[in-house]
Image: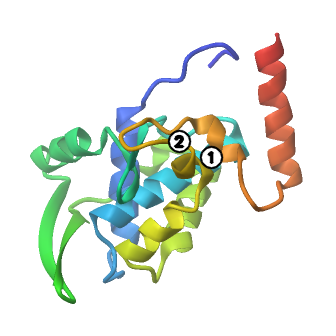
Amino acid sequence: MSQHATPSFDASKFKEAVIYICSKSEGDPRFGSVKLNKIMFYADFRAYTELGAAITWATYRHLSEGPAPKEMLPCRSELESDQALKMETRSYFNRLQQRPVALRPADIDVFTGREVAILDGAIDHLRGRDASEATDMSHREWGWKLTNENEDIPYALAWLSPDPLTEEQISVGEQLAQGLQS
């Protein structure tokens, strides 16, 4: 991709990321649709700061339950039609949980090793947390704080964090800034 090309959504990587996350979260009783949305958000936005490009370039919207990719429902429907994913409704305490379940292994060849590591990191980041906790965490993100209901969350907001930047993130940011100046 050239420095000035507009990034475009990669549906095949998005679908494989969904399958990968669902497979890796199979043993997590707290995993459901809301948590899947947050894992996707954290992975894409982390990749943007660490690699200079998102994994899927999904468009994340500010929703009341936190960031969610607008492409999720159509891609999920396609995965269900292809019999790669099914949705289960489970009782989780006093609520119903919509749980996506992978029906096949993910094709991880569509990802780089770094992208897989970022996906794993996002899964680990939310491991042990339920949907409410994942939502609360996402509400502390600047991308969610600085946008309004139903607005797109710009990837550039991933740079805003209360945590100090790593040397690698500074380097990627400088490279992105140079591309904007030329």
Q: Mark 1 points at which residue?
A: 47
- Mark 1 residue element: helix
Tell which residue pokes out farthest to the bottom in this image: 93
Q: Which residue is drawn at 39% across and 42% down?
A: 14
Q: Residue at x 82, y 10 (%)?
A: 182
Q: Quadrant of residue 148?
A: top left
Q: Which of 23 and 46 is in front in this view?
A: 46
- Mark 2 residue element: loop
Left or right: residue 171 versus residue 55 is: right
Q: In which quarter of the image is residue 15?
A: top left
Q: Measured from the top left, where is residue 115 in percent x and y? A: 58, 50
Q: Measured from the top left, where is residue 70 in percent x and y? A: 32, 39
Q: Which residue is drawn at 44% across and 35% down?
A: 152
Residue 179 seen anywhere in this rendered image of the structure: yes
Q: Nearer the viewer, residue 93 or 172?
A: 93
Q: Nearer the viewer, residue 63 or 118?
A: 63
Residue 106 seen anywhere in this rendered image of the structure: no
Q: Residue at x 38, y 44 (%)?
A: 149
Q: Name the residue under label 2.
A: 55
Q: Residues within 10 Å of mark 2 (few under 14, many from 20)?
A: many
Left or right: residue 30 versus residue 137 is: left
Q: Are marks 1 and 2 in contact (CB under 8 Å)?
A: yes
Q: Which amino acid does label 1 sit on?
A: Ala
Q: What residue type is labelled 2?
A: Ile
